[in-house]
Amino acid sequence: MSSPDETRFSDGPTLDAMTPHELAALLHFHADSGVEWLLEDDPIDRIAAFAASQTARGEAGSGSGHGSPAGALQTAQSYRAPAPKNEADGRAQPPAAEKPQTRGKSEPAPRPVSTRVAIPDEQAVAEARIAAGSAQTLADLKVALDGFTGCNLRNSARNLVFAEGDPAAGLMIVGPGPNGDDDREGRPFAGRQGDLLDKMLAAIGLDRAGVLITNVIPWRPPGNRMPSAREMEICRPFLDRQFALAKPQRVLVLGNFAARFFFGGTDTIHEMRGDWRTITTGGETFRALATLHPQDLMSAPICKRLAWQDLQMFAAGNDS
């Protein structure tokens, strides 16, 4: 009779029986859970292996008369293997180091490193500048970014999340980077955060079609981790080119990460919000206002009154 665990896991289809759609859904589930690498070719039941090793130890201990921990310790301390002698002078040699034993199945051979993995370096930054600089429209820039392989983030992301909206509107909204919903749908501010952003824009008479919405980072980092400094440096030319092509009159910066990216320092969004600042890129200067990210407002609804003040300033374009 099979165990409850075996019965439970045998209910679903095996990998060989899964359809391509089911396999893709399983991979997406693991990616959303933060899984990045496979450690073994085949699954290993570590709990069962540990239980088997404990049983084997118990049987060995009872057979030798040293089943108790004290007896095992005494046996280990009293036993010393004779040291081999040097045939030339008869002196004892230190025992050779024993090769550690592995439990369960033998370790698999190391996998070859995928050629798709990019190594962030100065060459990748230079290639990003060239690719971004050659784009004459946002459509060209999206094609260039989609074909750019110099950033590791694209290897774990499901979709490129590029700017959306009207580049000629003169209004630009910049968030930190894609979350799981954005990565699945391939558009900025999807899901619940996007719904709240839509309501924020509607409150000041705007909608997605009347602004340009983008992110600092166009690919979702694995497990929603913080992008590294080099990853941000590689992605920056593509964001700078969006500014150069759209030439926004006003920029709304959402959240801690994006505000620190543009304005520097370690202040929180509560300290940086509510004041007009400047973003300088490519020799041009743009007026920018920082405010709370929709996720901040979902976590602390009491802060909506602060965001409302910032939205009114952004819509009016003045300091009041």
Image (cartoon, rainbow, N blue to C red):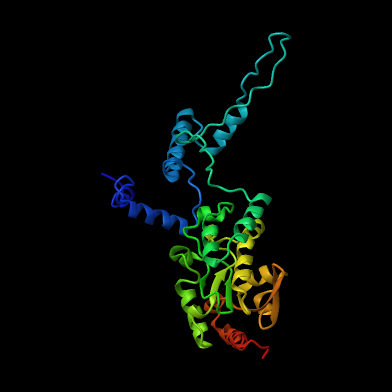
Pick the front one: 283 or 101 = 283
Q: Quadrant of residue 51?
A: top left
Q: Which residue lies furthest to the top in this view?
A: 88
Tell me the quadrant of the picture where the C terminus can be found: bottom right
The answer, for residue 266, to whether it is visible in the render is: no
Q: Which residue lies furthest to the front in this view?
A: 136
The answer, for residue 190, to whether it is visible in the render is: yes
Pick the front one: 89 or 173 = 173
Identified at 57% across, 28% down, the residue is 99
Residue 219's x, y, as percent?
A: 53, 60
Pick the front one: 149 or 303 = 149
Residue 25's x, y, as percent?
A: 37, 56
Identified at 28% across, 52% down, the residue is 11
Residue 236's x, y, as percent?
A: 64, 62
Q: In which quarter of the image is residue 251?
A: bottom right
**313 to 50, vertically: above or below:** below
Residue 264's x, y, as percent?
A: 71, 69
Pick the front one: 222 or 205 = 205
* Residue 40 falls left or right of residue 152: left
Q: Quadrant of residue 242?
A: bottom right
